[in-house]
Image: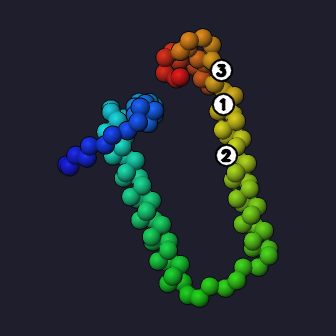
Amino acid sequence: MSTIPVELPDHLQSYVDESAVQAGFANASEYIVALVAAASEKQGEIEQALIAGIKSGSAEPWTDEEWQAIRSRVVSKALSRENLERRIRSSISPMNGNDCTLLGRQNQGNLP
């Protein structure tokens, strides 16, 4: 396996270290390998979708109804994501110092 030295600003190094622990990786290196692998897989999926689109033939203009349906799905997804983020934020209630209650469970020192 090859090694790539990477310099990160302190705040990104902290983010990577914390994210690796939260995601259950043994170290930051394993976490970064997983991120790169996921990005590579996603890139392959995008390229396959583009090729399928090209092979599908001529494009036809979308109707107003189709545009409205797309808009509705995008808005619905955005609202769902906002609601999820709001619920997650409301489930984290700092107590003191590094102690906090997360989703009804007591965790000490695991969250900022």
In the image, taking residue 84 as reference, residue 54 lies left or right, namely: left
On the image, the x and y values in percent for residue 62 come to 72, 79
Ranked by sequence position, the earlier of labels 3 and 2 is: 2
On the image, the x and y values in percent for residue 5 come to 26, 43
**What residue sits 22% from the left and 46% below the top?**
3
Which label number is shown at residue 81? 2
Residue lying farthest bottom?
Answer: 58
Amino acid type indicated by mark 3: Ser
Which label number is shown at residue 105? none
Amino acid type indicated by mark 1: Arg
Q: Which residue is mark 1?
A: 89
Which label number is shown at residue 93? 3
Question: Distance between the Cα atoms at labels 3 and 2?
Answer: 20 Å
Residue lying farthest left?
Answer: 1
Q: Secondary structure at mark 1?
A: helix
Quadrant of residue 104 within the rendered picture: top right
